[in-house]
Image (spheres, rainbow, N blue to C red):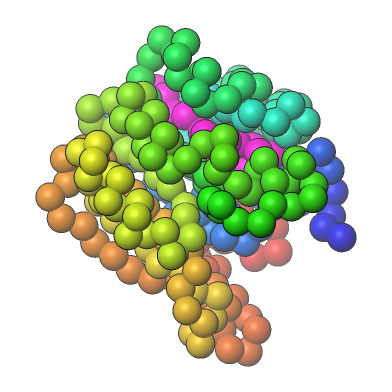
Amino acid sequence: MPNNYFQFKQFIIHQDKCAMKVCTDACLFGSCLPPTPSGGRRDMHVLDIGTGTGLLSLMFAQKNLYAIIDAVEIDKAAAEQAKENFNSSRWKERLNIYNDSIQQFAKSANKKYDVIICNPPFFENDLKSKDKQRSLALHSDTLSLDELISIVDLLLKEDGNFFCLLPYHRTKYFEELLLKYKLHVKKKVFIKQTPKHNYFRTIFWVDRFSTGFTQSEMIIMEEKNEYTKGFRELLGEYYSNF
């Protein structure tokens, strides 16, 4: 069974109340989020959609000292867990948790965001888990990709940046939806478990104005079952055993 907590260098994630535990690809996603992507030293307003344990918010808060983060989580237990994790961190004054659907949150939002981050439900129309909480976290019945992007379009500032982690097989579909809302890929990173594996995740950096994009790949493990140099460099400021 997964541990009830995950110790990072500068914060701890308790996860006993959450269906979705800390996982390697989410940690990699968080480490790939750039520091101060909106530029300058002004306060940066950030929205974390479906925060779960609060992992991405905490990773972003560590890297961005001027980030004020609103984290939205529909599941009550997970929202309570995220609040506990936020309150035990050194950045608690900059971290806000909202136990609500992102649809309802968007309706009452009175500001737009410099940065939006999301590790959304992965599966549509697949077999559901018998665990209702885990099914809610994994499946997109409550938030389709189309609806997610429409909300991002509504809440993102004109010069804002949107970051998203998705299964690789949904890459093309996601890009087609972005065009529908006149959003553009600035950068994408394809992720493999090992050199022999196929890609299984894609990290997107999206804005409103990019006319071209860069792409790269990240391999998590070497064939000898050791983390790659690139992975270690990215996670070095977070993992306590690096």
Vertical order, 184 against 44 (above or below) = below
- From this viewpoint, which residue is outermost toward the left? 211
174 left or right, relative to 102: left
Q: Quadrant of the N terminus?
A: bottom right
Q: Quadrant of the C terminus?
A: bottom right
Span colored in magenta: 42-61
User: Would you identify the image quadrant in which residue 90 lies?
Assistant: top right
User: Would you identify the image quadrant in which residue 133 lies?
Assistant: top right
Identified at 58% across, 89% down, the residue is 223
Q: Nearer the viewer, residue 4 or 1?
A: 1
Residue 184 location (% of width, % of height)? 23, 46
Residue 233 location (% of width, % of height)? 50, 66
Residue 126 in view:
yes
Residue 138 location (% of width, % of height)? 63, 48
Vertical order, 219 against 93 (above or below) = below
Identified at 55% across, 43% down, the residue is 140
